[in-house]
Amino acid sequence: MPNFTKKAIKETFIELLDERPLNKITVKDIVEACGINRNSFYYHYQDLPALLEEIIAERLQALMSDHPTIDSIEDSFDAALDFVLDHKRAVLHIYNSMSRDVFERYLMEVCRYVVATYIETAFAGQEPEKKDMLIRYHKCACFGHIIDWLNTGMKDDMSSYFHQVVQHLGWQDEARI
């Protein structure tokens, strides 16, 4: 039953994050909602930050599995954005918490993965230095746009905005990136 218990803990935690800020969630809240005892929680997780980190790491792995290839810079940004949009309120609660560094670290990894996956495909024949430069630039642009969007409370349609930027700058033609 450990898999069932871990799954219940994670699902309950995400539900609570959708409702309230991270600093307003306790282990007691989770175990009461799951109908388990505290020892069961601590058997699986050291603390709430460890639980949060595992959930985010699993989301990153799922994203990588779901997107083994990416055909355009727009698709790479959308894939990174999907990672955030799954649970907007929960993401905002994590972003505005003491665990922001964990979120930012994984968000940067998401941005690196989706951009690198696209660049490696679109620029397969290019020298590694050029690809590395493009990956670094677009990874930071992707990360920066998402962070800026989070700082404004996720009010805009970020996907539409980014598609307009790509079109305006002519990035849809790989040779111009």
Image (cartoon, helix red, strand yellow):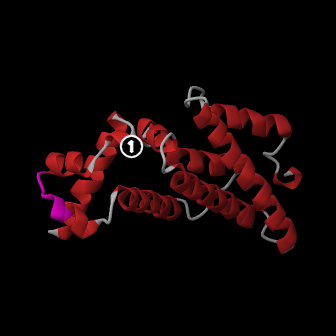
Residue drawn at 17 percent across, 45 percent down: 33
- Residue 4 in view, yes or no: no
Residue 8 horizontal/vertical position (percent): 22, 55
- What secondary structure is marked by label 1? helix
Query: Can you say which quadrant of the picture contains the N terminus?
Result: bottom left
Is 33 above or below relative to 113? Answer: above
- Residue 112 in view, yes or no: yes
Badge 1, how many Cα within 10 Å: few under 14, some, many 20+?
many
Residue drawn at 56 percent across, 31 percent down: 154
Q: How many marks?
A: 1
Q: Could you say which quadrant of the image residue 158 lies in?
A: top right
Foreground: 108 or 94? 94
Q: Is residue 37 magenta?
A: yes
* 14 left or right, relative to 92: left
Residue at the limit of the structure toward the top, as seen here: 155
Residue 78 horizontal/vertical position (percent): 60, 45
* 176 left or right, relative to 106: right
Foreground: 174 or 38? 38
Q: Which residues are magenta?
A: 35-40
Residue 114 horizontal/vertical position (percent): 63, 58
Residue drawn at 55 percent across, 58 percent down: 106
Q: Could you say which quadrant of the image residue 67 lies in?
A: bottom right
Residue under circle 1? 22
Q: Amino acid at mark 1?
A: Leu
Residue drawn at 35 percent across, 56 percent down: 48
Q: Could you say which quadrant of the image residue 124 lies in?
A: bottom right
Q: Is residue 2 magenta?
A: no
Residue 12 horizontal/vertical position (percent): 25, 48
* 67 left or right, relative to 49: right
* 50 left or right, relative to 116: left
